[in-house]
Amino acid sequence: MKYDYLIVGAGLFGCVFAHEMAREGRNVLVIDKRPHIGGNIYTENRMGINVHMYGAHIFHTSDKKIWEYVNRFAEFNQYINSPVAVYHDELYNLPFNMNTFSKLWGIRTPDEARAIIDEQAKKEVKRIFKERAANGDESAAEALDVAAASGQDIREGFEAANLEEQGLSLAGRDVFEKLVKGYTEKQWGKDCKELPAFIIRRLPFRFIYDNNYFNDRYQGIPMGGYTSIISKLLLMESSESESEKNITGTITVKTETEFKEFMKMDGDVPAKPFESVSGDSFDKILFTGMIDEFFGYKLGNLEYRSLKFETKDLPDTDNFQGNAVVNYTERDIPYTRIIEHKHFEFGTGKGTIITREYPADWKPGDEPYYPMNDEKNNKLFEDYKKLADDFGDVLFGGRLGQYKYYNMDQVIAAALEMAKNGMSTVN
Ligand SMILES: Cc1cc2nc3c(=O)[nH]c(=O)nc-3n(C[C@H](O)[C@H](O)[C@H](O)COP(=O)(O)OP(=O)(O)OC[C@H]3O[C@@H](n4cnc5c(N)ncnc54)[C@H](O)[C@@H]3O)c2cc1C
């Protein structure tokens, strides 16, 4: 069979692109190596609960057009993400807001909270300058003298040498130690003293009583799970929306199909004109897997952080933790959070399902979750992009193809843009 596009990856990016092509009357084939559609937003219904199989996914956006687009494929509930943090036996609301500060220090007003944070942060910067001065750093000694003589804020002109100094200078010791340090160290698999300061440019302090994690105008969880959005995008399930009627193109889907095993190859890359080993032909390809894998890693491996998920069905527990997301901020507890899936959809049925999320180092062959967008890897990606431009007729999209951390709304926006432009190369 002849197709206009082969779309590699049935994640959100590939599926939005496939859908838009079908709306344009094109015929596309979507393949994925996993046994299911949806990529990382895949949800599976068990015990009447939609389980987020690749970690908690909360849809949030400030882009009205994207919100309207996604609402063509699902009705969203009123879920507002309000995680709770556990530090030893203490519980705090996130993001850092007046509820957090009130619990930390027994205070009530924003002025009291600001005063404590300022005082603690200044104390830490002074301590760091003193340590630097004791080690012979003359500029640190000078900064201390100037601040003492002029009454100037000691934090002015302070440059943190690592993430620990940065966190302490922004948040003071209490917030940093209890809510930032251990969690960050688990996420990156490194001590905060070994991490660069730029990872935390600022901390999102909110001096109001508001536990809504996101600032976006629109937020929610699709009732019935994310997989149903994907089925509708792939025309496997019909959508109620008027704008989804009269689609003239077709979408064929094959799961458990690995790209390079599927295609006729010319060394590490697909042979041109594009053809599968079973004789299907394709004018163009959209590839949403890893761009370095496409080119046989010929310039080297891009690096990622990985995750491990441990999901447990608890048929005899109806409510495990009372909240969808609970973060564990101590370093000694190896997981970063526990998700209780039923609370995303206000479930009240019998039994519950929880997932512990463990950050993990990544090595080739592991599931790549987060691109490591540091200077070295970004440069390598730019080099792969050049290869992609020269190769032609293949678009690279999504978090792996574009080596970018994308939220779902950004993925939709980027896929719509790419579909509109038809055949531009990597963005
Ligand atoms: C733990 C976690 C939590 C997140 N939480 C949120 C959140 O709360 N809100 C939010 O907006 N976003 C969230 N995101 C981001 C969201 O998951 C992504 O924006 C989205 O899933 C990216 O879609 P994609 O299509 O680019 O990639 P993917 O979903 O990864 O899809 C790519 C697909 O390509 C397939 N593939 C790769 N290589 C090949 C190959 N060689 N052959 C065949 N198939 C191949 C893969 O199997 C995969 O299915 C989260 C991400 C993670 C990791």
Image (spheres, rainbow, N blue to C red):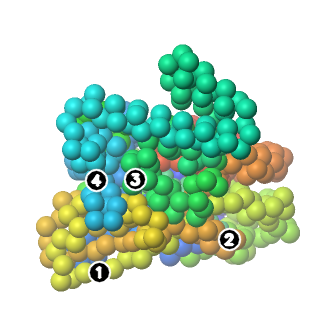
Q: Quadrant of the C terminus?
A: top right
**Any part of residue 411 in sight:** no
- Real-space Cα separation, disc 2 to disc 1, in angstroms: 29 Å
Q: Which mark is residue 313?
A: 1
User: Which residue occupies the foreground of this view, 233 or 321?
Assistant: 321
Q: Is residue 337 left or right of residue 383?
A: left
Q: Earlier in the sequence, mark 2 or mark 4?
A: 4
The spot of residue 279 in percent (x, y) is: 71, 71
- Mark 3 residue type: Leu
Contact between labelled residues 1 and 2, with CB atoms less than 8 Å apart: no
- Mark 1 residue type: Asp
Residue identifier under label 4? 92
- Please name the residue shown 45% across and 70% down the image: 332
Q: Earlier in the sequence, mark 3 or mark 1?
A: 3
Q: Earlier in the sequence, mark 1 or mark 4?
A: 4
- Please name the residue shown 50% across and 24% down the image: 153
Instruction: Determine whether the residue tagged by mark 2 lies in a helix, strand or loop.
Output: loop
User: Which residue occupies the foreground of this view, 140 or 53?
Assistant: 140
Instruction: Determine whether the residue tagged by mark 4 lies in a helix, strand or loop.
Output: strand
- Please name the residue shown 77% across and 70% down the image: 264
Q: Is residue 184 left or right of residue 315?
A: right
Q: Which mark is residue 179?
A: 3
- Mark 2 residue type: Lys
Q: Earlier in the sequence, mark 2 or mark 1?
A: 1
Q: In the figure, residue 362 lies in which quadrant?
A: bottom right
Answer above or below: position of 293 versus 141. below
- Please name the residue shown 76% across and 62% down the image: 301
- Real-space Cα separation, disc 3 to disc 2, in angstroms: 29 Å
**Crowd around label 1: few <14 · some 14–19 · many ≥20 (10 Å):** few
The spot of residue 117 in percent (x, y) is: 38, 36
